[in-house]
Amino acid sequence: MESDTYNDTLPSVDQDLTLQRISLGIHGAPELKRDEKLNYLGEFRERIIRRLTKKQVADTFVYTEIEEALKHEKSSKMLINGTLSPQLIDKYIKLARQVDKSYTMIYDPQLTGNTGLVVVSNEAVDIKDIDVQPQDPGSKDQLSR
């Protein structure tokens, strides 16, 4: 009889699993690097090839660095901040179509930071400097679209 009493006081595997499921229901699934992903339109930093700020996306020209990033051997898609005006992003959507890359508009009120557009890979590329440097609209390094 003592062994039965002892077993009743120890949590069973079923009880642990039940507690885990309750916790998952209350708090949601654990997420790796949540703050980082909210800053980079839902992607991990190590998967980003190039990044533009919202202000850079609003420039009237297309940054050649984005075209080069879309042609990168590991590039898989372009993500665009959904809060930006369609008139501002149209030139990048056309560019993605020209180089046959998919694009996705990201609408998430929890997004933080000033990221306007990222070109990403499905795997880590660990590019040290992902930020495109702002340039003068008259610069010859830009494409008009």
Image (cartoon, rainbow, N blue to C red):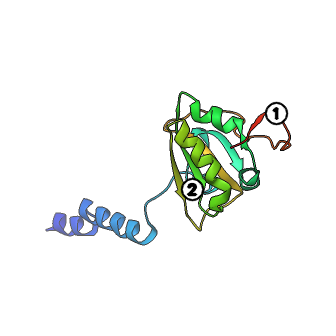
Amino acid type of the residue that numbered disc 2 sits on in the rendered structure: Arg
- Badge 1 density bin: few <14, some 14–19, many ≥20, Cα 10 Å: few
Residue 110 spot, x, y in % from top left: 60, 66
- For the residues labelled 2 and 1, the Cα–Cα distance comes to 38 Å
Report the number of numbered marks. 2
Residue under circle 2?
34
Residue 53 spot, x, y in % from top left: 72, 51
Residue 107: image quadrant is bottom right
* Residue 92 seen: yes
Residue 94 spot, x, y in % from top left: 58, 45
Q: Nearer the viewer, residue 127 or 12?
A: 127
Which residue is found at the position 45% from the left and 68% from the top? 27
Q: Quadrant of the N terminus?
A: bottom left
Q: Earlier in the sequence, mark 2 or mark 1?
A: 2
- Badge 2 density bin: few <14, some 14–19, many ≥20, Cα 10 Å: few
Instruction: Say which element carries label 1.
Output: loop
Amino acid type of the residue that numbered disc 1 sits on in the rendered structure: Lys
Instruction: Say which element carries label 2.
Output: helix
Which residue is found at the position 64% from the left and 32% from the top? 68
Farthest residue, direction top: 73
Q: Nearer the viewer, residue 88 or 20?
A: 88
Q: Quadrant of the C terminus?
A: top right
Q: Nearer the viewer, residue 84 or 126?
A: 84
Residue under circle 1?
140
